[in-house]
């Protein structure tokens, strides 16, 4: 078996495991409910009289801050608690196969949740004439943001067997990743910090890149940013697992 | 390749705990090696290093001639491993779990199905095949763990307390299975039941505080008990080697 086949075996088991517990159902319901609630009530989906999905996408980062950790916390922490970590680490898998397979399964799961919001898209198309390109790019941005948060969470989950700790660490880390681009924070910094520093900080924030994509602009730098965050945390995850081996 | 497992000068430190102190081990095909020692002696730690779950602090491991540190994936194909406590995914059924193991071992489709069937038949899991692992009794959990380790018919089996927590009937069955498997395989099993060693093992190793204090046949081990002892001679020998009653602990005199 080559690395791709091994990763596929890990992916399949992991992805199916989401649907063997109530987790999948609970997650999907909460995600769809909150995404709708935010968009319609707080975002003023109807009041704006514009046929786009901005109010809907605007809240995804904040939704992900506590929903993504709920998915990622179990990735490694649960393997440690079940003792199955000893099993998968002694099967003929490489550490990278396990890390990537598990991450992709989690990402596929959150992407399925996101895809299930498609009635929103249908609704706006029915009510008006939205820019479909913009909506597509916004969906892509949301999926990438979810992936970046998951990669952070997977890494943090590999450091502990306590799922609550894994959850809290991930939520805080994702929050910080967003905060660096939050207008209030940036405005505060602009008062005294050099311009370059403020812009530099803003460009490390997931929020900055997410919002630029949400406007419907495909900028390679934004996509690259998310892919880099994912890659960096997967590499850290591999190191963390290897390091735990030698304790 | 006659010698299936070769471990040299294995060491493991966890912070300030020196769990394994220079263990050398060679297990040829056809040998059933019983790994004995008091709680915390370092049996599981040694097995975890041989199976690549833990990295040794020092020393080398070769499985079927493959260096575990150099080519871990290929080395891991050579053995089946039952970790202590027989862990598995709680929500998966026995069948699904074994199916995953078959895929992980590189079997697909028909081939994977056949392997799962054979493993289920071998350890008598037919009655619970569609039951979730977490709902199984201890005995069936242990058997599922054995089925998983056997599935690809490996030349090496490493079993950490395979009969722990089983009733006398199941213990008997598992021992019969291990004897049956013996043949051309190298089997390493750890246990706290000394009669088990006499029943199934062709060689016994006693480790105490991370070092080998005895290495020989079960009969030789028994002869280490003092002459006056008539009952439970294995137990007496074990105590003598691991509590320091007699100077059986100086490893020099006891190694082969
Ligand atoms: N991950 C770990 N971190 C720190 N110490 C550990 C770790 N794993 C094992 N140890 C220590 O290493 C020593 C050997 O433990 P090990 O589990 O190998 O013993 P054992 O011979 O299998 O015992 P038992 O018969 O109870 O299963 C013990 O002192 C144990 O506390
Ligand atoms: Mg043990």
Image (tube, coloured by chain):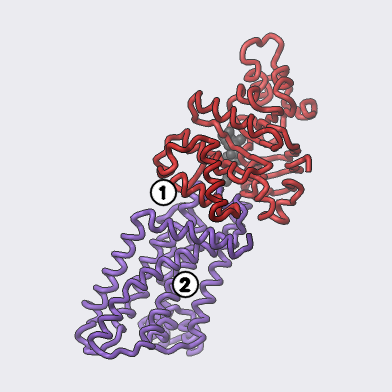
Please tell me which residue lies in front, A217 or B241: A217
Res. B205 image quadrant: top right
Q: Cβ(mark 1) to ligand 1 < 8 Å?
A: no
Q: Is residue A170 left or right of residue B22?
A: left
Location of residue A55 (image quadrant): bottom left
Give x and y (percent) for residue B201.
Answer: 67, 28
Chain letter belonging to callout 1: B
Q: Quadrant of residue B128?
A: top left
Q: Residue A6 placed where, x, y %?
A: 58, 60
Residue A206 to residue B146: above or below: below
At a point 48% along the width and 26% down the height, the residue shown is B167
In the displayed orientation, state which residue is furthest to the left: A47
- What is the secondary structure assignment of the residue under circle 2? helix
Q: Is residue A1 left or right of residue B143?
A: right
Q: Nearer the viewer, residue A80 or B174?
A: B174
From what the image shows, is residue A106 above or below residue B4?
below
Residue B91's disc number: 1
Label 1 CA crowd tier, 10 Å (few <14, some 14–19, many 20+): some
Q: Residue B113: horizontal and vertical position, in percent?
A: 52, 49
Whether label 2 touches label 1, CB < 8 Å: no
**Label of residue A76 in the image:** none
Image depth: mark 2 or mark 1 in front: 1
Above or below residue B34? Residue B93 is below
Location of mark 2 (residue):
A148
Q: Colour of chain B?
A: red
Q: CA distance from mark 2 to mark 1?
A: 28 Å
Q: Which chain is purple in the picture? A: A
Q: Is residue A246 at least partly visible in the picture?
A: yes
């Amino acid at each position: 078996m080559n690395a791709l086949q091994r990763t596929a075996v890990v992916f399949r088991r992991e992805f199916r495991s989401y649907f063997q517990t109530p987790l999948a159902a609970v997650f999907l319901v909460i995600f769809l409910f909150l995404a709708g609630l935010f968009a319609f009530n707080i975002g003023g989906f109807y009041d704006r009289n514009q046929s786009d999905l901005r109010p809907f996408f605007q809240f995804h980062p904040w939704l992900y801050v506590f929903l993504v950790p709920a998915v990622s916390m179990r990735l490694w922490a649960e393997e440690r608690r079940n003792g199955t970590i000893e099993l998968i680490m002694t099967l003929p898998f490489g550490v990278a196969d396990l890390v990537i397979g598990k991450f992709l399964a989690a990402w596929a799961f959150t992407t399925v949740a996101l895809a299930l919001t498609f009635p929103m898209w249908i609704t706006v198309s029915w009510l008006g004439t939205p820019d479909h390109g913009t909506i597509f790019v916004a969906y892509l941005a949301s999926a990438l943001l979810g992936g970046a948060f998951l990669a952070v969470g997977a890494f943090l989950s590999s450091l502990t067997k306590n799922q609550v700790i894994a959850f809290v660490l991930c939520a805080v880390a994702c929050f910080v990743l967003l905060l660096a681009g939050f207008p209030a924070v940036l405005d505060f910094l602009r008062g005294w910090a050099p311009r370059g520093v403020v812009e530099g900080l803003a460009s490390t924030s997931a929020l900055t890149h997410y919002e630029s994509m949400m406007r419907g602009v495909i900028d390679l730098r934004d996509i690259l940013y998310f892919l880099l965050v994912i890659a960096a945390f997967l590499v850290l995850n591999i190191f963390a697992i290897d390091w735990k081996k030698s304790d | 390749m006659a010698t299936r497992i070769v471990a040299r000068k294995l060491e493991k430190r966890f912070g300030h705990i020196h769990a394994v102190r220079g263990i050398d081990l060679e297990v040829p095909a056809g040998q059933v090696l019983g790994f004995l020692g008091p709680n915390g002696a370092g049996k599981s730690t040694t097995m975890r290093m041989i199976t690549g779950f833990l990295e040794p602090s020092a020393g080398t491991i070769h499985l079927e001639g493959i260096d575990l540190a150099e080519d871990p994936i290929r080395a891991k194909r050579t053995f089946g491993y039952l970790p202590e406590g027989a862990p598995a995914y709680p929500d998966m059924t026995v069948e699904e779990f074994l199916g995953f193991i078959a895929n992980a071992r590189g079997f697909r489709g028909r081939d994977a199905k056949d392997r799962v069937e054979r493993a289920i038949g071998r350890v008598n899991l037919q009655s619970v095949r569609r039951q979730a692992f977490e709902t199984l009794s201890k005995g069936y959990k242990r058997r599922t763990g054995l089925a998983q380790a056997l599935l690809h018919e490996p030349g090496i089996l490493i079993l950490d307390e395979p009969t722990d927590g089983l009733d006398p009937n199941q213990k008997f069955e598992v021992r019969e299975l291990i004897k049956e498997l013996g043949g051309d395989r190298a089997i390493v099993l750890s246990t706290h039941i000394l009669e088990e060693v006499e029943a199934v093992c062709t060689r016994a190793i006693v480790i105490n505080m991370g070092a080998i204090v005895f290495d020989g046949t079960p009969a030789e081990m028994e002869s280490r008990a003092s002459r006056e002892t008539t009952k439970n001679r294995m137990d007496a020998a074990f105590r003598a080697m691991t509590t320091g009653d007699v100077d059986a602990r100086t490893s020099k005199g006891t190694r082969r």
